[in-house]
Amino acid sequence: MTEQRRKSKQFNFRLDEALAGRFEEYCNGRGLTLTQFFENSIRLAIGEPLTIPQEALGYTPSSSIAVASQNIAPVDINLADRVAELEETVKQMASRIETLSNTPDINELIEAAIARRSESLGKLAA
């Protein structure tokens, strides 16, 4: 174990005293060393297997989903608004398509105009 620690990289950093005190209490309350907590938190963050139960870190998949869902709630609201706008646009387009489908085909209009013109010319010739 001592040999393994000598081969390990050591990090030094500072924490607010009050935060450090609460952190030590947190780890002691779970039977963890500070190193175990840090190492396994890092493992969890980068997707490596943990050496302790995940719950010992105070992390459960459902708690992370709850936190994540709080962060994406505004996106859901914006998406709902956007979907409503798109649905209205689709309704308007469908109405236009229906109107156009009830309009005579341009060829029908041309043929009718030609027929009327021919009829008028026929009456004039007679």
Image (cartoon, rainbow, N blue to C red):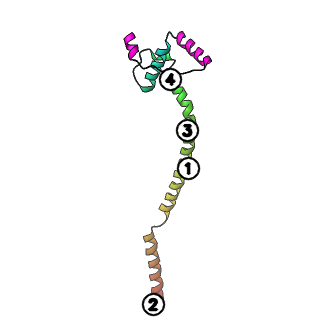
Regarding residue 1, the answer to whether it shows in the image is no
Residue type, mark 2 in image:
Ala
- Which tag, 4 or 2, sits closer to the chain's start? 4
Instruction: State the residue position of label 4.
Output: 62
Residue in view at x 51 percent, y 51 percent:
90
The residue tagged 1 is: 88
The magenta region covers 1-28
Is residue 2 found left or right of 99 in the rendered image? left
Residue 29 image offset from top left, x and y in percent: 54, 10
**Nearest to viewer (mark 3 / mark 1):** 3
Q: Quadrant of the N terminus?
A: top left
Give the Cα distance between marks 1 and 2: 55 Å
Which circle's residue, 2 or 3, is located before the other in the chain?
3
* Residue pointed to by mark 3: 75
Of tags 4 and 2, which is closer to the observer? Answer: 4
Considering only vertical position in the picture, is 47 above or below 124?
Answer: above
Q: Residue at x 53, y 22 (%)?
A: 13
Q: Report how far apart the C-alphas of labels 1 and 4 lie in the structure.
A: 36 Å
User: Which residue is under mark 2?
Assistant: 125
Q: Mark 4 to mark 2: distance in Å? A: 90 Å
Query: SS for tag 2?
Result: helix
Give the prevailing secondary structure in the magenta stretch: helix
Q: 85 above or below 73?
A: below
The nearer-to-camera label among 1 and 2 is 1
